[in-house]
Amino acid sequence: MARYSAWQILKQGLTGNKSWDPAWRDASPKSSYDVIIIGGGGHGLATAYYLAKNHGIFNVAVIEKGWIGGGNAGRNTTIVRSNYFMEGNTEFYEHSLKLWENLSQELNYNVMFSQRGHLNLFFTPGQRDAMIRKYNIMRLNGIDGELLDRDQLISKVPHLNYSQEARLPILGALYQGRAGTARHDAVNWGFARAASNLGVDIIQNCEVTGFISTGGRLVGVETSCGEIRAEKVGMAVAGSTSLLAHKAGLGRLPIESHKLQAFVSEPIKPFLDSVVVYGVGHGHFYISQSDKGGMVFGGNLDGYNSYAQKGNLPLYSDVASCAMNMMPALGRVKLLRQWAGIMDMSMDGSPFITKTDLDGLYLNAGWCYGGFKATPASGWCFAHTIAHDAPHDVNKLLTLDRYKTGHMLDESGHGPYPKSH
Amino acid sequence: MLRLECPVCGLRDHDEFTYLEDGSITYPKLANENQDDWFNAVYLRENPRGRHIEKWHHTFGCRTVLLVERDTLTHVIGKIKPAHPKIAAALKQPATAKKRS
Amino acid sequence: MTGSRFASGGLIDRKKPITFQYDGMPVQGFAGDTIASALMASGHQIVGRSFKYHRPRGINSAGPEESGALFTVGDNANRTPNVKGTIAEIHDGLIVRSQNAFPNVRYDLGAVNSLIAPFLTAGFYYKTFVGPFSGTRFWMIFEYFIRKAAGLGVASRDADPATYDIAHHHCDILVVGAGPSGLWTAVQLAEAGQSVMLVEQDFACGGQLLSRNNARDAAFIAEMQSRLTRAGGQIMIRTTAFGLYDGLVTGLVERVTDHLSAPHESLPREIFHIVRPQQIVLASGALERGLAFGNNDRPGVMLAHAIARYAGRFGVSAGQSCIMATSHDGTYDDALQLAEAGMKICVLDARPCYTDAQEAAKRVGLDIMFETVPVQVAGGRGVAGLEVGMCDSDGLVHSDNRMIGADVIGMSGGYSPVVNLLSHRGVKPVWDADIQAFRSGPTTEAIHVVGSADGFYDNEACLASADVAVSHILRPRRRDAETEIFRGWQTPAMPLFEINIQGRSLKSFIDPQHDVTTADIRQAHSEGFVSVEHMKRYTTLGMATDQGRMGNILGLATMAEARNMPIAESGITTFRPPFTPVSIGVLAGRSSGSDWWPTRRTPMHDAHLATGAVMMDVGYWKRAWYYPQNGETMDEAYIREAAIVRQTVGMVDVSTLGKIAIQGPDATEFLNQIYINAFAKLPVGKARYGIMLRDDGHVMDDGTTWRLSDDEYFMTTTTAQAGPVMLFLEELLQTRMTNLEVHVSSVSDYWAGIAVAGPLARQVLTGALPALDWSNNAFPFMGVQSAELKLGGAVIPFRAARISFSGERAWEIYVPADFGNAVWVHLAEHVALAGGSPYGMESLGTLRIEKGHVTGAELDGRVTLEDAGFAKMASKTKPYIGSVLRKRSGLMDESRPRLVGIFPKEKNKSFGTGAILCEPGAVSGFGKGWVTAVTHSPALGHWIGLGFVSGGYEAWKGKTVMIADPVRGATIEGEIVSPHMFDPDGGRQNG
């Protein structure tokens, strides 16, 4: 398949754009593979890519029940950052950010990762202190992060609500300059294309309906396209993890499915350069502007278990009031579209990339609402875990049994209440 | 907006309530010292797509904890009753069963 | 196209001329005009520029489907970008600007993009700009320019000065859309006794009927409105139902003041109405769709019916000579209406002549070209003519390069029912081949679709469909044998989406705002983006501000054709809320600015302010932070306050603590189960410090609980955990501890609390509250007593406990909240006489840090009893919440960070909260611990801190710790000490 380049665009443009190849091969399932990845989201596609690229395992299928990138991979608010402070998370997300920095080159696909910077606002001294602890940990791990006082923040984003009439006046922000946003669809398509180029079969509209095991070992899956055998099966189906885990006989998992709404405004001329985020009390808000000009924003979970990819009104007001609190110029900007995704909320807010109790079955789950930024490292680590039947150092703490031994990765300190993370 | 029929207060918007958790969890007796039993109750979830029994607290109302049957896919609400058996029984008495709205 | 006003006609009020500004030019219109109709009447034809190629855009519709006529309205902080000119009404003084163009829409330098259009096709940016070197720098350089070119209007950066409101409603029936079907349904239901709300996004009722402007229709609209009002129905115009949610809850936005030149200041700009109807009638109508042919994006190419609507409703002629290209009978009414109004009309009908409507039009002399389709528009900045082609029976088009003259072209490929609101409920639209459109699929909810929203295009059929809905609503059990009502037109529409000529490459737009052409769809197909969702995302079709109303079906049809499958199988993308864009401001309502959050003030709030306190936010609460005197800084003030407490006496407002009354025969047992320590032996008249865990064994909260009688306790919680603890206790009692007879009530707001602390506290209280004996014998540490205070004629009950957070001899006094301020002032006089002063949160922090007492900074949800030094308090003889899971191996690990005190090595140095504690030579990674609190201790004379460090004090005795704070720049040496840094034996509090 021809590499993408300016030259290709020129050539195709001059000949009517009529001979572009498919971005990826739309494959039909073979009877068996070395590895099957269930779930054609960003994580699943990235896993397949890194299996082929890093581990030389080319006989791989990605099975997707709908169209690739149709789940959370194509529904998120596209923020990429690595500001985590718990051992297990910090190094994982930083590994991801490093992969992001050269992902477009790696995939020969412009994923539009734009390091526009990420501002985390604080309103009280207590909030500032807790955030400084986090950013100190980042700095000690070689990750960028800095403290901006109010004046520095004003010069960076002059149109936040600095009024002393504000219910909680903004005191400053912690800033990660290497963080930013990327184009979610491009990430999915880029990984699909690169994986397909390495021989991975991408099979859409194929739903896994069951698992086949013999002698306590998984040997394949039953699908709507028939039985497919495999040496190893990896699951990366955030939002549906519990459903498939039940089918695989893994039983109950430390996961609840919750819905998160996202919002985008009409396109406006450049209005906000950085990603701006805050969480204070029950208020939680994040916003950035897409390259098309839409303000992309969101807030809390709706707060109850759900598999419905649709939102409810109280959250509209909740999120809009957080927007108005932070940036009152947004009042006349109009909301264009709202949608929702189903999050795998884990019991401590951190994910799992791990083997399971069933030989041959591997689990990638529990991303809560932070899965997008993890995409490259998640695939990278999951591929390693599957290929070696053992985790890489970077994901060795992201296990399923950490709650049993009391090794939670609870960044928010909320405890075993998934809706609170 | 989910609309929950509180047996005490009547039909109300869900933002009057606090969602607590899966109502099908059976917590071990306090005297049970088995870590696995507690681990199962505190950390593992059935997480069904479909019928789900769950606990809601009528925080901005009567502060009753309710067991609500709800479909997690369609959000259709089924039976609702107070979690405390004595409160449920008391509300079934004819004198108090009459709904106020 | 050069539009003009007809000499007469239309629903505008020609006696009320209105002047507004458009790009600095005065434009005149009349009351009843929209921005679009007034501009068209004044001959403005290029009113916008497209997103990508900056091609000129004209007005292309007369409703919310508009994608060309978008303006920036208003000035300065009142500036609103992307306003649809086809909806917005004009008023005197209105300021309208065109957007996304430089210097203006008529001459836009951005149009240079058109020259490189062949290289900017679908997905081009995914394939380039990656750059020759690693990292993101190269892309970000290009991105800078892409971002500048993207976006439409410019939003103001000033705070929106408008107010917004949220209103709540209940009704039996919500009718969405006040066209003939909606009006008729609403009237019948209201007259049958239902409470009915009828909402209409337009500023007039009538829907389709407004386009005709004939007397009979006008009379019908007037009659329906008056009957509905008489029957108690509510009509809301300028109100859009933007989304439909669970429980049929519907979100509406009413535009209240944007159409007024001098609105009353008390009016909100918009109102967000939240309606909870029993049933919903969707009479949201249908939207016309265009056809894809060459240069169909030129200003002057419009939806066919829109031309008729501008003529009928606004008295505006879109041009002199008009071509109407169609594939169905529906366009004939429009064509005849325009011909009658005096426009030169030529109908291109893709079909041969065989229908009644065609024959009838022919009979009255309408100029019709059968089996003829538009091929390519001539003209750059407007319509100069149209090349037409012949369409044979196989649907193949042949062009003999025939041009016909016209300055305006109407196009119609049929009508698409507006099913967006049902789509919000997850109801998938289904393709109806008879009407060549998607209709709503079946729903189990109480939503009834009537009129053209369900594919009934004929007026009679619309009303008949309304009758069916009315009957279903009023007589739900009775299902009469229904006579089938005829959908669509008498003769089915011909499927016609794109005009394609073999060997010709036409620029046929399906999303004129985003510059998506049929060629882009075919490219997406060849690149494998064939799922409709992939197609949408790859080409951006349907993601413009019209949300795909103009072109979605054309795109789907093009893809279906490329895939060689029927549209019904290729599917349709999901419609997302909102139906039309909604201001972020109105969704927030009044929850912004100083009203973003509730503000909780303690009963003593005014007294703090009167004493010059600087207040701070603690959750919803406002608390006194410090009380500066004579221009003191915060540091000076808190150090003074803390020193005074240690030297004489201080008082602090503790009203924000959570207070819970725990009553009942099993109250003691309940406390035993929720606290780690035993309460069974706590005598009446005594308080005990207790710690609560979560089920997972981490510390949830701490506080004191006072035994008031055998079966009554008074529990205090931390300020932050007051709500969660109360909720948790209620949950336990109603679910897991239902055998206990205990009642809990929050009494947080009932009691105001004051702590009096310091060596002179006893003297102060003896003077101020003489009803009690405050001596050590009568009132020992952890004692609880109640009495009354006679103050200014009032008899004020109070309760007091001898407990100490500061480490000084101290009491907490609680009085009913109404007397809080009076008692505070009364005590303050006695405190002042003793040389003391009030103290705030900052010095409260100093005092507790000196003592090693923990707060939320330490108890951050990840801390165990061992970590915080509480393990010895935990009962070994009884189970309690969290007693099992706290013993998990990882939580009992000896190397976990434990609470410690921290001193700087060099006593003149300070350090910061959030610093990381590391071993010398290993200032990296995750360190060995962290600093949770820092203060300058007046008692010790230097900076001190609390924190957690691996292994605790024992492991660090005599060792140096590095206090690393790279974010703030400094790393200093420190030493680990016991957290009890001041008066470790507690002699001061017990004495």
Image (tube, coloured by chain):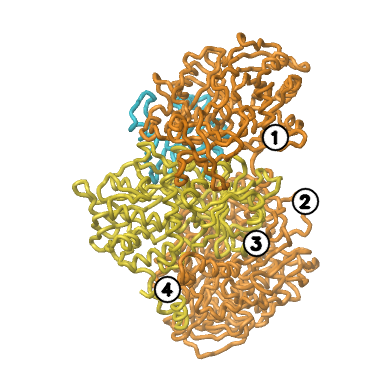
Rendered location of residue C374, percent (x, y) = 54, 82
Q: Distance between the residues labelled 2 and 1?
A: 46 Å
Give the colour of chain B.
cyan
Q: Name the residue under label 4.
A: A4
Q: Which amino acid does label 2 sit on?
A: Glu
- A228 to the left or right of C480: left
Q: What element carries label 1?
A: helix
Give me the chain letter of mark 2: C
Rendered location of residue C373, percent (x, y) = 52, 82
Q: Mark 1 points at which residue?
A: C636
Mark drawn on residue C206: 3
Q: Is mark 2 on a helix, strand or loop?
A: loop
Q: Are marks 1 and 4 in contact (CB under 8 Å)?
A: no
Nearer mark to the viewer, of 2 and 4: 4
Q: Which amino acid does label 1 sit on?
A: Glu
**Marked residue nearer the N-terminal end (3 or 1):** 3
Of residue C444 and residue C846, the one placed in the foreground of this image is C846
Q: Is mark 3 on a helix, strand or loop?
A: loop
Give me the chain letter of mark 3: C
Give the colour of chain C.
orange
Nearer mark to the viewer, of 2 and 3: 2
Q: State which chain is coloured yellow.
A: A
User: Which quadrant holds the N terminus of chain A?
Assistant: bottom left
